[in-house]
Amino acid sequence: MPQRSSGITLQQLQYFIEVAAEGSISSAAELLWVAQPTLSAAMKDLEARVGRTLLLRSARGVSPTSDGVEFLGYAKQVVEQASLLEQHYLGRPPSRRLLGVSAQHY
């Protein structure tokens, strides 16, 4: 029986959102207080888990692929819902950044 990988983590989604917003793994790593190689490995692991390339990498930084743009919309929704759940049931204050959700156009 093939071994199933564990699911996508909330941390990976948060990392992906920050990388996409910054357009740079290095810049996102600084903001997240994570080593750049760690963040880069987390993005590669995320892509392996979903079986799709989510980021185009170049010397100028990164940008989401078309799959990455779609994934980003879902990631933002999940992170926002997790934040609302924590606020409601754990009494935590709102996160430092409110996420907007946009409709995907095909």
Image (cartoon, helix red, strand yellow):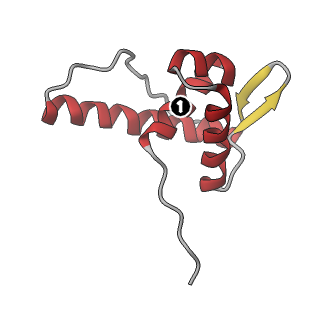
Residue visible at 35% across and 31% down? 80
Q: Quadrant of the C terminus?
A: top right
Q: Residue at x 72, y 46 (%)?
A: 53
Kind of residue at badge 1: Tyr
Q: Is residue 24 visible?
A: no
Counting other residues with Cα less than 10 Å from the Cα at mark 1, is it few (<14), some (14-19), or many (20 or more)? many
Q: Residue furthest right?
A: 59
Question: As rendered, which of 31 and 70 lies closer to the eye?
Answer: 31
> Where's residue 96, x and y in %?
36, 15
Q: What is the x, y in percent for residue 68?
A: 64, 39
| Quadrant assignment, res 10 | top left
User: In terms of secondary structure, where does tag 1 sit?
Assistant: helix
Instruction: Provide the residue designation for mark 1.
Output: 15
Which of 33 and 52 lies nearest the eye of the viewer?
A: 33
In the rendered image, the quadrant that contains the N terminus is: bottom right
Q: Residue furthest bottom?
A: 1
Q: Is residue 92 left or right of residue 27?
A: left
Q: How far across and down, in percent of the image, does residue 26 sit?
A: 68, 20
